[in-house]
Image (cartoon, helix red, strand yellow):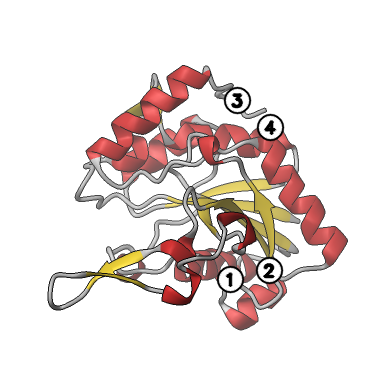
Amino acid sequence: MNVAIIPARGGSKRIPGKNIKSFAGQPIIKYSMEAAIKTQLFQRIIVSTDDERIAEIAREGGAEVPFIRPAEISDDFTPTADVIHHALAWLDADGAQVEYACCIYATAPFVSSEYIKRGYELLLEKQRSSVFSVTTFSFPIFRALKINDRGQLEMFWPEYEYTRSNDLTEAYHDAGQFYWLDSAKFIQTKKLYSSDASPVILPRYLVQDIDTPEDWEMAERMFRALQFDNNGK
């Protein structure tokens, strides 16, 4: 069985009600649910939440909320891995046999069924423990600067000061959209970033971290400018 798990707690502080706040006309979590549904890969799509209003919207959008997430894994400091581990353990105790799980973030309106399916194909083809979405940094990280304790600028890696940009190794960061997991391996290691992880590389214009109101406004502007297919291409 393949299961999609969408973490969506209710206690966001910087953007109150973040996981169900209206984004370009509908609760933002619905974009993740719609992309999961469109893949036709999942026998169950589960929202892990501690909030009844989120649970209600999740059910209206076609997802399940078979449990309410415990308070001890619903605070600001709970890692995503703990939330996924709890959901998989609950499913196992309920008799479900989950072979592969995909964690899809609730605030990922650019997430696409096409890339989720690509991740699944890669997981099977390469027999990886995890596959997740990444994108490139927009500037070479080896040219990064820091401000020292004297208020002066220094390079983190001064040895690359005169290296051509084309000769620097490309660097990637987590795109914050989805993580495919071999369920049995994840239960043992509890690692999203497994030692054998493979990437699904997204174009930068489809990646927007949404942590502040300014991030939210920028993401909505990008979304509308792209006339993004809300059902996931």
Residue designated by label 1: 193
Q: Which mark is residue 38?
A: 4
Task: Please tell me whether residue 14 is drawn above or below residue 228 in the rendered image.
Answer: below
Q: Residue at 63% x, 39% y: name it.
A: 36
Q: CA distance from mark 3 to mark 4?
A: 7 Å
Q: Which mark is residue 231?
A: 3
- Which one is earlier in the sequence, the residue at label 1 or at label 4? 4
Q: Is residue 149 visible?
A: yes
Q: CA distance from mark 4 to mark 2?
A: 25 Å
Q: Residue at 38% x, 26% y: name it.
A: 220
Looking at the rendered image, the quarter that the N terminus falls into is: bottom right
Task: Please tell me whether residue 126 is drawn above or below residue 14 in the rendered image.
Answer: below
Q: Residue at 54% x, 36% y: name it.
A: 206
Task: Please tell me whether residue 179 is drawn above or below residue 129 in the rendered image.
Answer: above
Q: Is residue 35 left or right of residue 50?
A: right
| Residue at the far left in the pictured view | 150
Looking at the rendered image, the quarter that the C terminus falls into is: top right
Give the structural element (helix, strand or loop) at label 4.
Answer: helix
Q: CA distance from mark 1 to mark 4?
A: 26 Å
Q: Nearer the viewer, mark 1 or mark 4?
A: 1
* Residue 214, percent from left and from top: 25, 37
Q: Which mark is residue 140?
A: none
Query: What amino acid type should be assigned to the residue bearing mark 3?
Result: Asn
Where, by quadrant of the figure, is residue 50 drawn?
Answer: bottom left
- Crowding at dot 4, Cα within 10 Å, few <14 / some 14-19 / many 20+, comes out as some
Q: CA distance from mark 1 to mark 3?
A: 28 Å
Query: What amino acid type should be assigned to the residue bearing mark 2?
Result: Ala
Q: Are marks 3 and 4 in contact (CB under 8 Å)?
A: yes
Q: Nearer the viewer, mark 4 or mark 2?
A: 2
Q: Are marks 2 and 1 in contact (CB under 8 Å)?
A: yes
Q: Nearer the viewer, mark 3 or mark 2?
A: 2
Where, by quadrant of the figure, is residue 231 drawn?
Answer: top right
